[in-house]
Amino acid sequence: MGESAEGFTDPSDGVLTEAAAVFGLLASPARLHIMWALSQGESDVTCLADRVGGALPAVSQHLAKLRLAGLVRSRREGRRQVYYVDDPDIVTVVRVTVGQLTARSHQAPARVRRLYEAGV
């Protein structure tokens, strides 16, 4: 591991690989929307599907991937499964990122549109 001029140590390859996997999961707009919704509070799959505008089977598949990655968990409440974010740090990342991009889109929509059009 290298050290930068500011004294920070570079993360290990394993940590970078794991971080890339998490960011890869969150790169899906549908999964990011689900994480955003769950960062606001727990929900069952039916309410999530209504909120994010997805089909119930698709939302269930996204939740399964997020569960496998350890980003969300569920618990049984009667006959329904209630989902919640299992990692408070991920909640922070999602809220800060989406919040900042929302603020920027109101301030400079043309710049955000150019990034989108450029495929960034």
Image (spheres, rainbow, N blue to C red):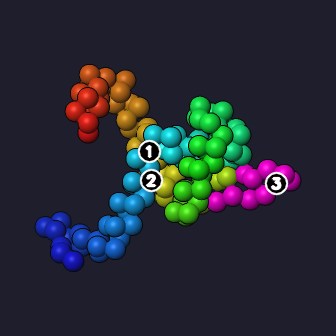
Residue 31 horizontal/vertical position (percent): 51, 45
Crowding around mark 3 (Cα neighbors within 10 Å: few <14, some 14 to 19, many 20+) is few
Residue 92 horizontal/vertical position (percent): 48, 51
> Distance of mark 2 from mark 1, alpha carbons?
6 Å
Q: Which mark is residue 28?
A: 1
Can the viewer see residue 87?
no
Residue 39 lies, with reference to residue 67, above or below; the image says above
- State the predominant SS element of the stretch in magenta: strand
**Residue 104 counted in the magenta span:** no
Residue 29 lies, with reference to residue 69, above or below; the image says above
> Distance of mark 1 from mark 3, alpha carbons?
28 Å
Q: Which amino acid does label 2 sit on?
A: Leu
Q: Earlier in the sequence, mark 2 or mark 3?
A: 2
> Distance of mark 2 from mark 3, alpha carbons?
27 Å
Q: What residue type is labelled 1?
A: Ser
Quadrant, the N terminus: bottom left
Residue 98 horizontal/vertical position (percent): 43, 39
Look at the numbered discs 2 and 3 and tell me whether their residues touch, using CB distance below 8 Å: no
Decide which of 27, 5 is in the foreground and name it.
27
Who's the residue at 34% across and 74% down the image? 14
Who's the residue at 56% across and 49% down the image? 62
Quadrant, the C terminus: top left
Quadrant position of residue 15: bottom left
Q: Give the range drawn in magenta.
A: 72-82
Q: Which amino acid does label 3 sit on?
A: Glu
Decide which of 115, 62 is in the foreground and name it.
62
The residue pinned by badge 3 equals 77
Q: Residue 25 carries which label?
A: 2
Is residue 87 toward the left or the right of residue 22 in the image? right
